Image (tube, rainbow, N blue to C red):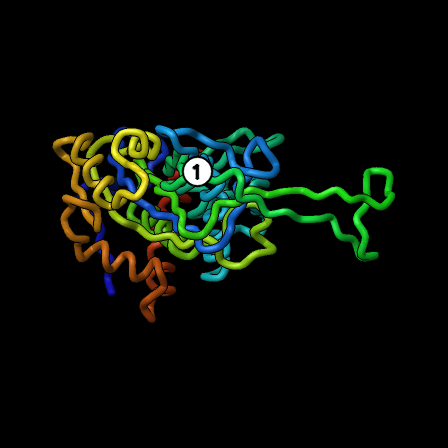
């Protein structure tokens, strides 16, 4: 299989300075399949936002992207030693050239400590909200059980204290608009792979199984900004019980620009094109030669970036 990319929405090659900013927005539905805790300022529940007379859980997009970055990093290491320098670890960057990989080129990186470099992210992920109501009264009560079988207070004595979690329940979902700005084709492939192959999110996710199922409902391509707002969608175009694909379609029809191309399963969109179906099949690892395709695409991007950064080093 030979992957092809659209003429709209992407740049042809990697450059540090982005004189043009075409973009692609992925319309992602994140279905909750197990009770999931999204912590923000509160330790026991998600932040909330009220639309109309209903309360919705509010989740910072970085809580999804950080998990997806780790999925991508694991993929790169499995594909071969050439893709991630042995000195690089997530969020602990080494020197610039040692930190250059598909993950940092796509999601960005800022040097820490004595490292004063930065790679700007090509991925823009805004806040997202549950499409249905977030019930603060639906609490899961836990106790602090120790090996001795007792609960303890702060002084180490036996305690009767309980603590509650308010989780987003199965049947709810979040619509998340993920935009790539001035990205290359392999960057789109990488983000799509990470979305389709990450299934555990939220606090305490290491103690649970798969709790979120991601699917791409549509894509928006444009020569300029194609970003969309979940808050705007829910405030102005969606009521409880509405068909979400129809609501998204109505929203996009109201805000779309003349040069936008809209594909997918949302109302008013054209069917997914063949290039996307092939890209999705490789990203989802549904084809036998997925690893070979991913390796070839990521090698091209990495080599191009190393040439650019090497010249500017």
Q: Nearer the viewer, residue 58 or 258?
A: 58
Side of 107 relative to 226 (left or right) = right
Q: Residues within 10 Å of mark 1 (few under 14, many from 20)?
A: some
Q: Position of residue 301 (x, y in %)?
A: 36, 48
Q: Nearer the viewer, residue 293 or 171?
A: 171
237 above or below 279? above
Q: Position of residue 19 (x, y in %)?
A: 27, 28
* Quadrant (top left/top right/bottom left/bottom right) for the N terminus: bottom left
Q: Quadrant of residue 252?
A: top left
- Secondary structure type for disc 1: loop
Q: Does any portion of residue 107 appear in the rendered image?
A: yes
Q: Quadrant of residue 268?
A: top left
Q: Nearer the viewer, residue 189 or 292?
A: 189
**Residue in the image at 49% along x and 61% along y:** 78
**Residue in the image at 32% along x and 47% along y:** 188
Q: Residue most toward the bottom?
A: 288
Side of 5 relative to 64 (left or right) = left
- Give the residue at mark 1: 61
């Amino acid at each position: 299989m030979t992957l092809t990319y659209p003429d709209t929405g992407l740049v042809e090659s990697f450059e540090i300075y982005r004189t043009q900013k075409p973009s692609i927005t992925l319309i992602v539905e994140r279905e909750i399949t197990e009770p999931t805790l999204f912590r923000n300022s509160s330790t026991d529940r998600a932040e909330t936002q009220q639309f109309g007379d209903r309360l919705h859980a509010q989740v910072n997009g970085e809580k999804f992207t950080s998990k997806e970055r780790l999925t991508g990093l694991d993929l790169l290491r499995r594909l071969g030693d050439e893709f991630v320098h042995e000195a690089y670890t997530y969020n602990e960057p080494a020197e610039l050239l040692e930190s250059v990989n598909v993950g940092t080129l796509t999601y960005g990186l800022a040097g820490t400590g004595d490292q004063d470099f930065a790679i700007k992210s090509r991925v823009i992920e805004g806040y997202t909200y549950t499409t249905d109501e977030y019930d603060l009264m639906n609490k899961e009560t836990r106790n602090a059980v120790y090996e001795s079988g007792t609960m303890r207070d702060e002084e180490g004595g036996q305690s009767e204290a309980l603590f509650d979690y308010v989780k987003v329940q199965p049947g709810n979902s979040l619509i998340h608009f993920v935009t790539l700005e001035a990205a290359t084709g392999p960057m789109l492939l990488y983000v799509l792979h990470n979305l389709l192959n990450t299934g555990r999110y939220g606090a305490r996710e290491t103690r649970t199984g798969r709790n979120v199922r991601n699917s791409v409902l549509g894509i928006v391509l444009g020569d300029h900004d194609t970003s969309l707002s979940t808050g705007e969608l829910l405030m102005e175009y969606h009521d409880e019980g509405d068909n979400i694909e129809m609501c998204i379609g109505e929203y996009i029809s109201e805000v779309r620009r003349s040069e936008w191309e809209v594909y997918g399963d949302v109302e008013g969109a054209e069917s997914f094109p063949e290039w996307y179906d092939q890209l999705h099949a490789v990203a989802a690892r549904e084809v036998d030669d997925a690893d070979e395709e991913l390796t070839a695409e990521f090698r091209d991007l990495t080599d191009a970036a190393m040439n650019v950064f090497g010249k500017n080093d």
